[in-house]
Amino acid sequence: MDRSNTRSAALGELEAALERQPPAGLDALDAAELGKLARLLSEAKRTQKAQVDAALTESLSHVPLLLRGAVRKILDL
């Protein structure tokens, strides 16, 4: 893969991680840096989602047992 294709792939990976067009200021980064940033963002999103899911599940312990099923459904757990 030549440099422009590598850079295009890294920009595509970053765009997918951001779920939008990357800011223009990131043009200063090379393909390796863009790829690393995309991977770090993706990992941070996965970690955040796991932590939020764990917190929501833990919060159910404060809900009366008879209501937990309804609360789970409302929270989409």
Image (cartoon, rainbow, N blue to C red):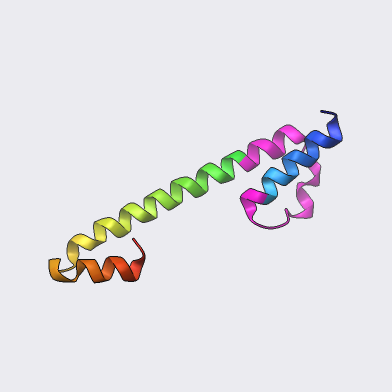
Residue 36 vs residue 67, the one in the foreground: 67
Q: Position of residue 72 (x, y in %)?
A: 28, 65
Does 26 lie within the magenta span? yes
- State left or right for residue 68 relative to residue 28: left
Magenta-tinted stretch: 16-38
Q: Residue at x 79, y 41 (%)?
A: 8
Which residue is drawn at the image coordinates 25% and 56% (left, top)?
Answer: 58
Q: In this picture, is 18 found above or below 28?
A: below
18 and 5: which one is in front? 5
User: At 52% from the left edge and 42% from the top edge, which residue is drawn?
Assistant: 43
In the image as oriented, which residue stretches furthest toward the left?
A: 65
Count of numbered badges drawn on the protein? 0
For the C terminus, the image quarter is: bottom left
Q: What's the residue at 14%, 70% (across, down)?
A: 66
In this picture, residue 43 sits left or right of residue 57: right
Q: From the image, which quarter does the N terminus lie in?
A: top right
Principal SS element in the magenta part?
A: helix
Magenta stretch contains residue 13? no
Q: Quadrant of residue 38?
A: top right
Q: Is residue 2 left or right of residue 72?
A: right
Residue 40: x %, y % from top left: 57, 40
Place of residue 54 in the rendered image (x, y in percent of width and height, measured from the top left): 32, 52
